[in-house]
Amino acid sequence: GQNIDQPTEMTATEGAIVQINCTYQTSGFNGLFWYQQHAGEAPTFLSYNVLDGLEEKGRFSSFLSRSKGYSYLLLKELQMKDSASYLCAVNSGYSTLTFGKGTMLLVSP
Amino acid sequence: NAGVTQTPKFRVLKTGQSMTLLCAQDMNHEYMYWYRQDPGMGLRLIHYSVGEGTTAKGEVPDGYNVSRLKKQNFLLGLESAAPSQTSVYFCASSFREGHPSTDTQYFGPGTRLTVL
């Protein structure tokens, strides 16, 4: 079966750095994705990792360790607009993504 | 380009009624997906399609049917709605499988369905 775990909620302060962790146990692996979802809106694609290491895209970075079944999303210089749910998803090679339940991030002034 | 669109945006049904949700994409994507999202449950895959004329079951297919008669459209049907089907439904599409750069999924705005 497929299992993806993320913390349910996190809080952080504007201007700070936050790391959202994701661990996974899947029957195969063909890439890990991070999505952002604001309340009442659709998920939007942030980043993906297919090889071990760090991928940087502006204020957002994502890290992957395939041997540990572990990824994290790093958000720097937090802004109020970063308050959202962050979804970790794994492509286990069957044409579909399995999503974690999401981490709700609340950024306070 | 409109991307992925969904109709309707909101709907209220009575138990036992039927309805069809329409998803359309103008990105020439091969793969299309239907998810439902419930509080505390995350996104769960209902059905998906890897090309025109094909469909497959996802994690929670019971009570739903789908059709993909045209490449750009993916329909989700509820034959006899139940209160347990109250949810937010998202459609998504991706170019193809093979590499994350091409199988990134793009989501529609969602349909909020309430079954009384």
Image (cartoon, grey):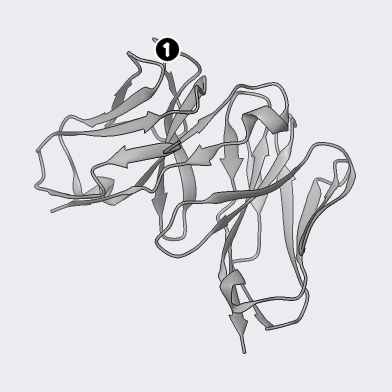
Q: Residue furthest top?
A: B53
Measuring from the top left, give residue B110's x and y in whole percent. 36, 47
**Residue at x 74%, y 30% (from the top left corner):** A30
Look at the picture and state if A92 lies above or below A71: above
Residue at image x 72%, y 41%?
Answer: A32
Q: Quadrant of residue A61?
A: bottom right
Q: Residue at x 76, y 75 (%)?
A: A77
Residue A53: percent from left, percent from top: 90, 47
What secondary structure is marked by label 1?
loop
Against A3, residue A79 (above or below) is below
Local crowd at mark 1 within 10 Å, few (<14), some, or many (≥20)? some
- Residue positioned 42% across, 12% down in the render: B52
Q: Is residue A27 visible?
A: no
Q: Chain of mark 1?
A: B
The residue under label 1 is B52
Instruction: Identify which residue, A52 or A24, lies in the foreground.
Output: A52
Left or right of residue B10: residue B101:
right
Residue B105 on image: x %, y %: 56, 36
User: Mark 1: which amino acid?
Assistant: Glu
